[in-house]
Image (tube, helix red, strand yellow):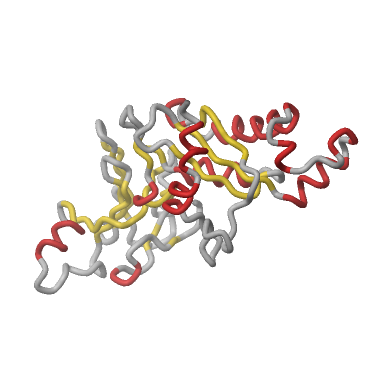
Amino acid sequence: MRSASAMLGLLAISAISAVGPAQAGYDYPVCLRVYGPANYNECNYTTMAQCKATASGRAAECYPNVFAGYLHNDTATAETFHDGWLLTGDVGELDDEGYLRVTGRKKELIVTAGGKNVAPAVLEDRLRAHPLISQCMVVGDGKPYIACLVTLDEEALDAWKARRPRLANASITDLIGDAELTAEIQGAVDEANKAVSRAESIRRFRILPVDFTEQNGHLTPSLKVRRGVVLKDLASDIEALYS
């Protein structure tokens, strides 16, 4: 994210958060910093506005217009702040130039059996960029590796089939085991995996015969995947990825 500013979570109690380092000639009160489990990478430009990520990668911010706490609710305040930093619902990191990159939401963070934290949006956004992929959902919470459910874009699939006469009359169900289609989706997975470490990469995927839609309850009205619903409805498909 290279814009001058971006909205982070908890917007009701915090204004716009700057996401880039101070630039020569501009008097922006910005401090962005990030730290991981073993080290700190800190860029202090001023102490007026700050944003960082916690050890688990959770974005946090601290500056004058962040609220001081919940009225008569010390427990909620303690859960929301860490050493004076407001914990947002976002997960992020700083790049080599000091720009904050929001990589996902804390509630969507996947923790594998090996303890690796994985932000699914990094992989999912890249997968959905492939024309044949309509929707996808990365899974792997408590599992030995990361896997993914994939649905196909019917219009793109029709065009893809038209260039392959042998598949002209094949349904999505017929195509699920097709080697050429599998290789096509594997290519998309390989491309997405370039953005993450091996421990975060997708090892297996499963193509589904039905798309995620608002009608079947798998998408919200804003077309976001309802992860909890998909996990419940497609539990057997997910389990098959680890069999």
Residue 97: quadrant of the picture: top left
- Residue 171: x and y in percent read 77, 43
Horizontal side of residue 227 vs 58, given as left or right = right
Question: Could one spot residue 129 in this view of the protein?
Answer: no
Q: Farthest residue in the right direction?
A: 165
- Residue 73: x and y in percent read 11, 68
Tell me: residue 220, above or below residue 155: below
- Residue 213: x and y in percent read 59, 58
Q: Which residue is painted at 30% across and 49% down in the image?
A: 52
Q: Which residue is painted at 52% across and 35% down in the image?
A: 195
Q: Nearer the viewer, residue 171 or 93?
A: 171
- Residue 202: x and y in percent read 51, 31
Horizontal side of residue 98 vs 159, given as left or right = left
Q: Which residue is painted at 42% across and 36% down in the image?
A: 140
- How many marks the image carries: the answer is 0
Horizontal side of residue 175 vs 118, given as left or right = right
Question: Could one spot residue 107 in this view of the protein?
Answer: yes
Horizontal side of residue 168 vs 27, given as left or right = right
Q: Which residue is painted at 17% across and 56% down in the image?
A: 79
Q: Nearer the viewer, residue 171 or 186?
A: 171
Q: Nearer the viewer, residue 72 or 87?
A: 72
